[in-house]
Image (tube, rainbow, N blue to C red):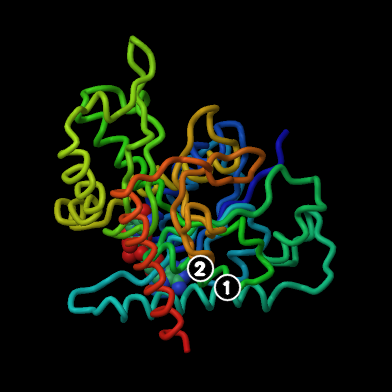
Amino acid sequence: SKEAIRVLVTGAAGQIGYALVPMVARGIMLGPDQPVILHMLDIPPAAEALNGVKMELVDAAFPILKGVVATTDVVEACTGVNVAVMVGGFPRKEGMERKDVMSKNVSIYKAQASALEKHAAPNCKVTTHQLHGFLLRFICLIGSNSYFAIRSQVVVVANPANTNALILKEYAPSIPEKNITCLTRLDHNRALGQISERLKLQVSDVKNVIIWGNHSSTQYPDVNHATVKTSSGEKPVRQLVADDTWLNSEFITTVQQRGAAIIKARKFSSALSAASSACDHIRNWVLGTPEGTWVSMGVYSDGSYNVPKGLIYSFPVTCKNGEWSIVQGLSIDEFSRKKLDLTAQELSEEKTLAYSCLS
Ligand code: NAI
Protein backbone atom coordinates (compact mmCIF):
# COMPACT_ATOMS: atom_id res chain seq x y z
CA SER A 1 0.00 0.00 0.00
CA LYS A 2 1.07 3.59 -0.60
CA GLU A 3 3.08 5.55 1.95
CA ALA A 4 0.97 8.28 3.58
CA ILE A 5 1.67 11.86 2.48
CA ARG A 6 1.81 14.43 5.25
CA VAL A 7 -0.11 17.59 4.44
CA LEU A 8 0.35 20.70 6.58
CA VAL A 9 -2.48 23.23 6.74
CA THR A 10 -1.64 26.37 8.72
CA GLY A 11 -4.52 28.50 9.97
CA ALA A 12 -6.47 25.26 10.05
CA ALA A 13 -9.06 26.54 12.55
CA GLY A 14 -10.04 29.37 10.19
CA GLN A 15 -12.64 29.58 7.46
CA ILE A 16 -10.55 28.18 4.61
CA GLY A 17 -8.95 25.58 6.87
CA TYR A 18 -12.38 24.26 7.86
CA ALA A 19 -13.33 23.85 4.19
CA LEU A 20 -9.94 22.50 3.15
CA VAL A 21 -9.12 19.74 5.63
CA PRO A 22 -12.12 17.53 4.72
CA MET A 23 -11.21 17.90 1.05
CA VAL A 24 -7.69 16.70 1.77
CA ALA A 25 -9.01 13.84 3.88
CA ARG A 26 -11.43 12.84 1.08
CA GLY A 27 -8.63 12.57 -1.48
CA ILE A 28 -9.59 15.63 -3.50
CA MET A 29 -6.09 17.06 -3.25
CA LEU A 30 -3.90 14.01 -3.82
CA GLY A 31 -6.25 11.36 -5.15
CA PRO A 32 -8.82 9.00 -3.62
CA ASP A 33 -6.30 6.18 -3.09
CA GLN A 34 -3.52 8.24 -1.56
CA PRO A 35 -3.37 7.92 2.25
CA VAL A 36 -2.78 11.25 4.01
CA ILE A 37 -1.78 12.44 7.47
CA LEU A 38 -3.04 15.93 8.26
CA HIS A 39 -0.87 18.37 10.19
CA MET A 40 -2.92 21.32 11.39
CA LEU A 41 -1.35 24.46 12.85
CA ASP A 42 -3.02 27.44 14.42
CA ILE A 43 -2.23 29.95 17.16
CA PRO A 44 -2.99 29.43 20.89
CA PRO A 45 -6.22 31.52 20.94
CA ALA A 46 -7.57 29.12 18.31
CA ALA A 47 -6.30 25.92 19.98
CA GLU A 48 -9.70 24.84 21.28
CA ALA A 49 -11.38 25.43 17.93
CA LEU A 50 -8.55 23.52 16.26
CA ASN A 51 -9.15 20.60 18.57
CA GLY A 52 -12.81 20.71 17.59
CA VAL A 53 -11.80 20.37 13.94
CA LYS A 54 -9.65 17.40 14.88
CA MET A 55 -12.64 15.81 16.66
CA GLU A 56 -14.74 16.27 13.53
CA LEU A 57 -12.07 14.70 11.34
CA VAL A 58 -12.13 11.64 13.60
CA ASP A 59 -15.94 11.61 13.54
CA ALA A 60 -16.06 11.77 9.75
CA ALA A 61 -14.16 8.46 9.55
CA PHE A 62 -12.36 9.28 6.33
CA PRO A 63 -10.93 6.01 5.00
CA ILE A 64 -7.67 7.50 3.65
CA LEU A 65 -6.97 9.72 6.68
CA LYS A 66 -4.22 7.90 8.55
CA GLY A 67 -3.54 10.45 11.29
CA VAL A 68 -4.09 13.98 12.51
CA VAL A 69 -1.59 16.28 14.22
CA ALA A 70 -3.30 19.37 15.65
CA THR A 71 -0.88 21.76 17.28
CA THR A 72 0.11 25.34 18.02
CA ASP A 73 3.80 24.44 17.81
CA VAL A 74 5.24 25.35 14.41
CA VAL A 75 8.06 22.82 14.71
CA GLU A 76 5.75 19.93 15.51
CA ALA A 77 3.45 21.04 12.71
CA CYS A 78 6.18 21.12 10.08
CA THR A 79 7.95 17.90 10.96
CA GLY A 80 8.11 15.63 7.98
CA VAL A 81 5.48 17.32 5.86
CA ASN A 82 5.43 16.68 2.12
CA VAL A 83 2.90 19.35 1.18
CA ALA A 84 2.39 22.64 3.02
CA VAL A 85 -0.68 24.79 2.49
CA MET A 86 -0.03 28.07 4.26
CA VAL A 87 -3.44 29.57 5.04
CA GLY A 88 -2.63 31.04 8.45
CA GLY A 89 -2.47 34.78 8.61
CA PHE A 90 -3.70 37.95 10.17
CA PRO A 91 -6.95 39.16 8.64
CA ARG A 92 -7.50 42.76 7.64
CA LYS A 93 -9.72 44.37 10.24
CA GLU A 94 -11.76 47.52 9.93
CA GLY A 95 -9.66 50.65 10.11
CA MET A 96 -6.39 48.82 9.46
CA GLU A 97 -4.00 50.27 6.92
CA ARG A 98 -2.63 48.07 4.18
CA LYS A 99 0.80 48.49 5.69
CA ASP A 100 -0.39 47.22 9.09
CA VAL A 101 -1.81 44.04 7.55
CA MET A 102 1.33 43.58 5.50
CA SER A 103 3.51 44.06 8.55
CA LYS A 104 1.63 41.45 10.61
CA ASN A 105 1.67 38.89 7.85
CA VAL A 106 5.21 39.16 6.57
CA SER A 107 6.38 38.86 10.18
CA ILE A 108 4.46 35.57 10.48
CA TYR A 109 5.98 34.25 7.25
CA LYS A 110 9.46 35.34 8.21
CA ALA A 111 9.11 33.64 11.61
CA GLN A 112 7.72 30.44 10.14
CA ALA A 113 10.49 30.31 7.53
CA SER A 114 13.22 30.91 10.09
CA ALA A 115 11.78 28.50 12.64
CA LEU A 116 12.02 25.82 10.00
CA GLU A 117 15.62 26.69 9.18
CA LYS A 118 16.77 27.03 12.77
CA HIS A 119 15.42 23.67 13.85
CA ALA A 120 16.63 21.64 10.95
CA ALA A 121 19.21 19.18 12.25
CA PRO A 122 22.56 19.44 10.46
CA ASN A 123 23.56 16.44 8.35
CA CYS A 124 20.66 14.41 9.52
CA LYS A 125 20.00 11.33 7.49
CA VAL A 126 16.34 11.36 6.83
CA THR A 127 14.32 8.23 6.46
CA THR A 128 10.60 7.75 6.59
CA HIS A 129 10.59 6.84 10.21
CA GLN A 130 13.20 9.22 11.51
CA LEU A 131 12.14 12.61 10.30
CA HIS A 132 13.86 14.85 12.80
CA GLY A 133 14.50 17.54 10.27
CA PHE A 134 11.72 19.90 9.59
CA LEU A 135 10.11 21.02 6.40
CA LEU A 136 13.30 22.61 5.16
CA ARG A 137 15.61 19.73 5.98
CA PHE A 138 13.13 17.39 4.46
CA ILE A 139 13.11 19.32 1.24
CA CYS A 140 16.88 19.32 1.06
CA LEU A 141 17.24 15.61 1.49
CA ILE A 142 14.23 14.37 -0.25
CA GLY A 143 15.93 14.34 -3.62
CA SER A 144 18.07 11.44 -2.49
CA ASN A 145 15.27 9.63 -0.77
CA SER A 146 13.38 7.54 -3.23
CA TYR A 147 11.04 6.40 -0.49
CA PHE A 148 8.72 9.30 -1.19
CA ALA A 149 6.61 9.83 -4.24
CA ILE A 150 6.84 13.61 -3.97
CA ARG A 151 9.05 16.28 -2.45
CA SER A 152 7.83 18.97 -0.13
CA GLN A 153 5.81 21.54 -1.95
CA VAL A 154 4.55 24.78 -0.46
CA VAL A 155 1.60 26.92 -1.51
CA VAL A 156 0.88 30.19 0.29
CA VAL A 157 -2.79 31.15 0.40
CA ALA A 158 -2.82 33.86 3.09
CA ASN A 159 -2.72 37.43 1.86
CA PRO A 160 -0.72 39.20 0.62
CA ALA A 161 -0.15 35.75 -0.89
CA ASN A 162 2.60 36.56 -3.42
CA THR A 163 4.59 38.64 -1.00
CA ASN A 164 4.15 36.23 1.93
CA ALA A 165 5.50 33.49 -0.35
CA LEU A 166 8.42 35.69 -1.33
CA ILE A 167 9.27 36.36 2.32
CA LEU A 168 9.00 32.65 3.10
CA LYS A 169 11.39 31.95 0.24
CA GLU A 170 13.87 34.67 1.22
CA TYR A 171 14.02 33.64 4.87
CA ALA A 172 14.33 29.94 4.12
CA PRO A 173 17.11 30.13 1.54
CA SER A 174 17.76 26.38 1.59
CA ILE A 175 14.28 25.61 0.31
CA PRO A 176 14.53 25.41 -3.48
CA GLU A 177 12.67 28.36 -4.97
CA LYS A 178 10.82 25.96 -7.28
CA ASN A 179 9.10 24.52 -4.21
CA ILE A 180 7.50 27.77 -3.02
CA THR A 181 4.40 29.04 -4.77
CA CYS A 182 1.32 31.10 -4.05
CA LEU A 183 -2.31 30.48 -4.89
CA THR A 184 -3.80 32.26 -7.91
CA ARG A 185 -5.70 29.18 -9.04
CA LEU A 186 -8.84 30.56 -7.44
CA ASP A 187 -8.62 33.59 -9.75
CA HIS A 188 -7.95 31.25 -12.68
CA ASN A 189 -11.01 29.18 -11.80
CA ARG A 190 -13.09 32.33 -11.37
CA ALA A 191 -12.11 33.37 -14.90
CA LEU A 192 -13.13 29.94 -16.26
CA GLY A 193 -16.41 30.27 -14.37
CA GLN A 194 -17.19 33.71 -15.81
CA ILE A 195 -16.53 32.55 -19.38
CA SER A 196 -18.65 29.44 -19.00
CA GLU A 197 -21.52 31.44 -17.47
CA ARG A 198 -21.33 33.96 -20.29
CA LEU A 199 -21.36 31.28 -22.98
CA LYS A 200 -23.76 29.02 -21.08
CA LEU A 201 -21.32 26.12 -21.51
CA GLN A 202 -19.77 23.60 -19.16
CA VAL A 203 -16.85 25.06 -17.22
CA SER A 204 -14.88 21.90 -17.98
CA ASP A 205 -15.01 22.79 -21.69
CA VAL A 206 -13.17 26.10 -21.13
CA LYS A 207 -9.39 26.13 -20.73
CA ASN A 208 -6.16 28.10 -20.88
CA VAL A 209 -7.21 31.39 -19.36
CA ILE A 210 -4.27 33.06 -17.59
CA ILE A 211 -3.97 35.03 -14.39
CA TRP A 212 -0.89 37.24 -14.58
CA GLY A 213 0.73 38.86 -11.56
CA ASN A 214 -0.51 39.57 -8.09
CA HIS A 215 -3.38 37.89 -6.25
CA SER A 216 -4.92 41.34 -5.81
CA SER A 217 -7.14 43.67 -7.79
CA THR A 218 -4.25 44.47 -10.17
CA GLN A 219 -4.10 40.87 -11.41
CA TYR A 220 -4.70 40.50 -15.14
CA PRO A 221 -7.15 37.77 -16.19
CA ASP A 222 -6.20 37.16 -19.83
CA VAL A 223 -8.40 35.26 -22.30
CA ASN A 224 -6.32 35.88 -25.42
CA HIS A 225 -5.17 32.25 -25.58
CA ALA A 226 -8.21 30.63 -23.97
CA THR A 227 -10.30 28.13 -25.88
CA VAL A 228 -13.64 26.37 -25.60
CA LYS A 229 -14.49 22.84 -26.64
CA THR A 230 -17.52 22.88 -28.93
CA SER A 231 -19.28 20.27 -31.05
CA SER A 232 -17.41 21.72 -34.05
CA GLY A 233 -13.97 21.57 -32.42
CA GLU A 234 -11.94 23.88 -30.22
CA LYS A 235 -12.67 27.60 -30.66
CA PRO A 236 -10.97 30.71 -29.25
CA VAL A 237 -12.90 32.35 -26.41
CA ARG A 238 -12.57 35.71 -28.19
CA GLN A 239 -14.33 34.31 -31.25
CA LEU A 240 -17.19 32.78 -29.27
CA VAL A 241 -17.79 35.65 -26.88
CA ALA A 242 -17.49 38.15 -29.75
CA ASP A 243 -17.83 41.07 -27.36
CA ASP A 244 -14.40 42.57 -26.84
CA THR A 245 -15.83 45.37 -24.72
CA TRP A 246 -17.09 42.85 -22.16
CA LEU A 247 -13.88 40.82 -22.28
CA ASN A 248 -11.67 43.89 -21.92
CA SER A 249 -13.58 45.52 -19.10
CA GLU A 250 -16.38 43.86 -17.12
CA PHE A 251 -14.94 40.36 -17.33
CA ILE A 252 -11.60 41.59 -16.00
CA THR A 253 -13.01 43.66 -13.15
CA THR A 254 -15.46 40.92 -12.15
CA VAL A 255 -12.60 38.44 -11.72
CA GLN A 256 -10.36 41.01 -10.04
CA GLN A 257 -13.03 41.95 -7.53
CA ARG A 258 -14.71 38.62 -7.01
CA GLY A 259 -13.11 38.12 -3.60
CA ALA A 260 -14.57 41.39 -2.32
CA ALA A 261 -17.98 40.50 -3.83
CA ILE A 262 -18.00 37.20 -1.93
CA ILE A 263 -17.03 38.87 1.34
CA LYS A 264 -19.84 41.39 0.82
CA ALA A 265 -22.37 38.62 0.19
CA ARG A 266 -21.20 36.11 2.78
CA LYS A 267 -19.56 38.36 5.36
CA PHE A 268 -16.74 35.83 5.25
CA SER A 269 -14.01 35.22 2.72
CA SER A 270 -14.39 32.83 -0.20
CA ALA A 271 -13.46 29.77 1.83
CA LEU A 272 -15.09 26.97 -0.18
CA SER A 273 -13.67 28.08 -3.53
CA ALA A 274 -10.26 28.94 -2.06
CA ALA A 275 -10.02 25.49 -0.47
CA SER A 276 -11.12 23.73 -3.65
CA SER A 277 -8.67 25.75 -5.75
CA ALA A 278 -5.82 25.01 -3.33
CA CYS A 279 -6.57 21.31 -3.92
CA ASP A 280 -6.51 21.90 -7.70
CA HIS A 281 -3.18 23.74 -7.38
CA ILE A 282 -1.48 20.94 -5.46
CA ARG A 283 -3.11 18.13 -7.43
CA ASN A 284 -1.93 19.50 -10.78
CA TRP A 285 1.51 20.33 -9.38
CA VAL A 286 2.03 16.83 -7.96
CA LEU A 287 0.13 14.73 -10.50
CA GLY A 288 0.54 16.92 -13.59
CA THR A 289 -1.61 19.07 -15.87
CA PRO A 290 -3.55 17.41 -18.70
CA GLU A 291 -1.89 17.49 -22.14
CA GLY A 292 -2.57 20.81 -23.87
CA THR A 293 -3.81 22.52 -20.73
CA TRP A 294 -2.10 25.05 -18.53
CA VAL A 295 -3.06 26.53 -15.17
CA SER A 296 -2.06 29.68 -13.29
CA MET A 297 0.36 29.55 -10.36
CA GLY A 298 2.22 32.24 -8.46
CA VAL A 299 5.88 31.24 -8.92
CA TYR A 300 9.30 32.78 -8.60
CA SER A 301 9.92 34.83 -11.72
CA ASP A 302 12.86 33.86 -13.91
CA GLY A 303 12.32 36.92 -16.10
CA SER A 304 9.90 35.20 -18.51
CA TYR A 305 7.69 37.69 -20.38
CA ASN A 306 9.96 40.46 -19.10
CA VAL A 307 8.52 40.15 -15.62
CA PRO A 308 11.23 41.30 -13.19
CA LYS A 309 13.17 38.45 -11.60
CA GLY A 310 12.82 38.09 -7.86
CA LEU A 311 9.05 38.49 -7.62
CA ILE A 312 6.51 35.76 -6.97
CA TYR A 313 4.27 36.39 -9.96
CA SER A 314 1.38 34.41 -11.41
CA PHE A 315 2.19 32.82 -14.76
CA PRO A 316 0.63 30.16 -17.00
CA VAL A 317 2.35 26.88 -16.11
CA THR A 318 2.25 23.24 -17.05
CA CYS A 319 3.28 20.58 -14.54
CA LYS A 320 4.96 17.24 -15.02
CA ASN A 321 6.76 14.89 -12.59
CA GLY A 322 6.06 17.26 -9.70
CA GLU A 323 7.64 20.28 -11.40
CA TRP A 324 6.01 23.34 -12.89
CA SER A 325 7.35 25.20 -15.90
CA ILE A 326 6.22 28.51 -17.27
CA VAL A 327 4.51 28.27 -20.67
CA GLN A 328 6.77 30.08 -23.12
CA GLY A 329 6.21 31.93 -26.36
CA LEU A 330 2.68 33.29 -25.90
CA SER A 331 2.08 36.53 -27.76
CA ILE A 332 1.41 39.54 -25.55
CA ASP A 333 -0.42 42.44 -27.16
CA GLU A 334 -0.04 46.07 -26.11
CA PHE A 335 -3.18 46.05 -23.93
CA SER A 336 -1.91 42.99 -22.07
CA ARG A 337 1.66 44.29 -21.78
CA LYS A 338 0.47 47.33 -19.82
CA LYS A 339 -1.52 45.12 -17.47
CA LEU A 340 1.39 42.70 -16.93
CA ASP A 341 3.63 45.65 -16.08
CA LEU A 342 1.10 47.30 -13.78
CA THR A 343 0.68 44.22 -11.58
CA ALA A 344 4.48 43.66 -11.58
CA GLN A 345 4.89 47.25 -10.42
CA GLU A 346 2.49 46.63 -7.53
CA LEU A 347 4.42 43.51 -6.55
CA SER A 348 7.71 45.41 -6.56
CA GLU A 349 6.14 48.01 -4.28
CA GLU A 350 4.79 45.29 -1.98
CA LYS A 351 8.24 43.75 -1.84
CA THR A 352 9.77 47.07 -0.80
CA LEU A 353 7.02 47.61 1.77
CA ALA A 354 7.47 44.08 3.13
CA TYR A 355 11.18 44.65 3.66
CA SER A 356 10.56 48.00 5.31
CA CYS A 357 8.10 46.28 7.69
CA LEU A 358 10.71 43.67 8.57
CA SER A 359 13.65 45.99 9.10
P1 NAI B 1 -9.54 33.19 8.95
O1 NAI B 1 -9.24 34.44 9.70
O2 NAI B 1 -10.86 32.54 9.08
O3 NAI B 1 -8.44 32.09 9.31
C1 NAI B 1 -7.09 32.38 9.45
C2 NAI B 1 -6.56 31.47 10.53
O4 NAI B 1 -5.14 31.67 10.62
C3 NAI B 1 -7.15 31.72 11.91
O5 NAI B 1 -7.61 30.52 12.47
C4 NAI B 1 -5.95 32.28 12.69
O6 NAI B 1 -6.00 31.95 14.06
C5 NAI B 1 -4.80 31.59 11.98
N1 NAI B 1 -3.50 32.21 12.21
C6 NAI B 1 -3.19 33.50 12.44
N2 NAI B 1 -1.88 33.66 12.65
C7 NAI B 1 -1.33 32.43 12.51
C8 NAI B 1 0.00 31.95 12.62
N3 NAI B 1 1.01 32.76 12.91
N4 NAI B 1 0.21 30.62 12.42
C9 NAI B 1 -0.81 29.79 12.14
N5 NAI B 1 -2.10 30.20 12.04
C10 NAI B 1 -2.35 31.50 12.22
O7 NAI B 1 -9.22 33.54 7.43
P2 NAI B 1 -9.61 32.71 6.12
O8 NAI B 1 -10.88 33.20 5.57
O9 NAI B 1 -9.44 31.27 6.38
O10 NAI B 1 -8.46 33.24 5.13
C11 NAI B 1 -7.11 32.92 5.37
C12 NAI B 1 -6.22 33.76 4.47
O11 NAI B 1 -6.41 33.40 3.11
C13 NAI B 1 -6.48 35.24 4.55
O12 NAI B 1 -5.23 35.91 4.53
C14 NAI B 1 -7.23 35.53 3.28
O13 NAI B 1 -7.07 36.88 2.86
C15 NAI B 1 -6.55 34.58 2.34
N6 NAI B 1 -7.29 34.24 1.12
C16 NAI B 1 -6.55 33.96 0.01
C17 NAI B 1 -7.15 33.57 -1.16
C18 NAI B 1 -6.33 33.26 -2.38
O14 NAI B 1 -6.92 32.96 -3.41
N7 NAI B 1 -5.00 33.31 -2.35
C19 NAI B 1 -8.62 33.48 -1.25
C20 NAI B 1 -9.32 33.74 -0.03
C21 NAI B 1 -8.66 34.12 1.11
Which residue sits at x=56%, y=57%? 154
Horizontal side of residue 143 vs 309, given as left or right: right
Q: Assess mark 1: CB under 8 A from ligand 1?
A: no
Tell me the residue that label 2 is attached to.
Answer: 166
Nearer-the-camera pick, 55 or 221? 221
Q: Point out the quarter of the image occupied by ligand 1.
A: bottom left
Q: Position of residue 45 (x, y in %)?
A: 39, 74
Horizontal side of residue 34 vs 126, given as left or right: left
Can residue 48 be seen at all in this image of the molecule? Answer: no
Q: Position of residue 313 (x, y in %)?
A: 45, 58
Tell me the residue that label 1 is attached to.
Answer: 170
Q: Position of residue 1 (x, y in %)?
A: 73, 33
Q: What separation in Å lies between label 1 and label 2 (alpha carbons)?
A: 6 Å
Q: Residues within 10 Å of mark 2 (few under 14, many from 20)?
A: many
Horizontal side of residue 192 vs 124, given as left or right: left
Nearer-the-camera pick, 75 or 309? 309
Q: Amino acid at mark 1?
A: Glu
Nearer-the-camera pick, 36 or 123? 123
| Circles 1, 2 touching at the beta carbon (< 8 Å) | yes
Which residue sits at x=35%, y=40%? 189
Which residue sits at x=78%, y=59%? 141
Horizontal side of residue 244 vs 341, given as left or right: left
Mark 2: secondary structure? helix
Q: Amino acid at mark 2?
A: Leu
Which residue sits at x=30%, y=40%? 191
Q: Position of residue 7 (x, y in %)?
A: 57, 52
